[in-house]
Image (cartoon, rainbow, N blue to C red):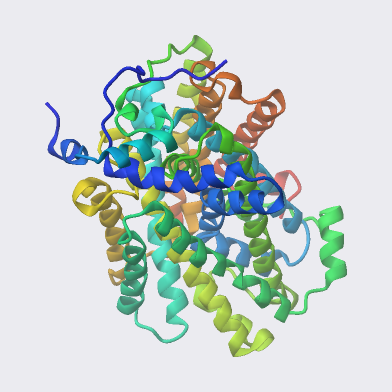
Amino acid sequence: MKPVSTQPETEAVLITHEDIDRAHDRLRVLSARGGRGFFSNARLLWLLIGPGVLVMLGENDGPSMLSYAATGAKFGIGFFIPFVILTFCMAIVVQEMTVRLGAATHRGHAELIFERFGPFWGWFSLIDLGIGNFLTLITEFIAVRAGLGYFGISPWLAILIALAILYAALMTHRYWTWERITLTAALFNLIFIPVALMTHPHWHAVARSIITAKPLPLFNSETLLILLADIGATVTPWMLFFQQSATVDKGLTIKDIRFGRADTVIGAALASAAAVATILATAPLFAHQMSAGNFEAAQFAQALEPVIGRFGASLFALGMVEAGIVAAITISTSSAYAFGEVAHKPHSLNLPIGQGKSFYGVLTLCAAAAAAIVLIPGLPLVYVVLIVNVVAVLAMPPALVFLYMLVNDKEIMGNLVSPLWANVFSTGVVLLLTAAGVLFGISVIAPNVFAIIGGK
Amino acid sequence: MRDRESSAVEQESSDYEKSVVLSALEHDQLVKARKRFFPRRQLKGAEFGILWALRIYVILMMFVVAYQVWIAAR
């Protein structure tokens, strides 16, 4: 069964600038698909890779890297290493659905929710996305400010550097160029790997923790908060909206789904390597019994200096800067895509400025407003960092239910609906996230309850 | 009435560009085709129930988050 088409074949064809740019990108894909063998497949992968790697490395953002750093510093090597790897497996299953949805319908996520469920539910999910994205954007600029602050750069200059990079990528007015620039920047997320190696991790302990998930942490409110923060560091609503919209903007079709999956898996592998490396990098802080309760990016780098030296600490701080900048680019883009889809305004990175005023306007406004908030002196920004991943986890179950319903909608997906195992898994993820959220609520309202059930 | 931005997007294109676009893109990928809507889906009772339950859950949990921030700020 083929997905329904929304366009009668006989209608006169009107070509736009966006169509022309996308068609040129697709011609290269079609030409590579004509070949056979390893090199043709490698070229196809190179051409089709992008949204999956960007979304996964983009989600290794400021607050996520801080969560992993806090995990390593508070719990060392143990349960959280396999747990984080598991959360990325969860992210692969969830994100793969957005690839299928985008390739089958050629519609963004917000657009589909509005069209299939109506504006009432559409606005709810858009408000969740908007609030989550804006809070997260603020934390990205906090990460950039803190990371560059380690080198003595003033907050104003740090924020201007971040905004300049974001706008430089946009000024290409071409999805392909934007994607390659952002991908290159995103690969710097792997900077945490050499930092981890500098701490000389106990590989035997790392292997044992991956196999046995031990030692287990105490079950208390602190552990629960870290668990939630680590889940929120890998699966969040903006990822669903971004990857589906980017898949559509890139022009992926049903024939490309295989490569879209590979893109997602490669992205998850790279991102989980960086995440585990961050845990390993800060694990010496746990071994040395250093308190890391309220550490921010620059403080982690300073605390690590005695262990890995000034060079290693500088790499760590640069990693935080990169995490903030790449996420600021992808998250503000996801907001702009969603706005354009809902307002039925042109929404593509292939648009020239004149034709995409609302798209670039929303993108610019989101980034600039978040950056400006970070510069207001005296604001208690630490609370935003504290709750942003938790808010992401709390907003995820409804977003996942919409995704589940859309990806199982035969009218738009045809034979590309999810297999049973994926539905069982995604139902499990929704239940797990909801249960984690309820436990978090209990821990806030009745903090002593964990002492009763055996925690600290 | 078409808005200015939408009409600005539609531009004259050469026959060559048209042929490139039509040979490289699927019909549903064209910007004009994407302006057509998918029909609204009729939600069943159970689906309504789940969506409302999760909506109430999110709103309640946002109050919990606000309470946590208030406690931390104190």
**Viewed as shown, does residue A320 lie left or right of A135?**
right
**Residue A80, x across and y down, in percent:** 72, 57
Q: Give x and y (percent) for residue A123.
A: 33, 31
Q: Nearer the viewer, residue A442 or A242?
A: A242
Determine which quarter of the picture holds residue A380: bottom left
- Residue A213's spot in the image, x, y percent? 81, 54
Residue A362 seen from this side: yes
Q: Which sits in the foreground, B26 or A61?
A: B26
Is residue A339 visible in the rendered structure shown here?
A: no
Q: Is residue A137 above or below residue A253?
A: below
Q: How many circles with numbers are drawn on the protein?
A: 0
Looking at the image, the residue that sits furthest to the front is B16
Residue drawn where x is 28% and y is 28% of the image: A13
Observer-nearest of A348 and A407: A348
Residue A300 vertical placement versus A208 (above, below): below
Residue shown at the point (48%, 53%) measured from the top left: A387
Q: Is A94 left or right of A421, judged from the image as shown?
A: left
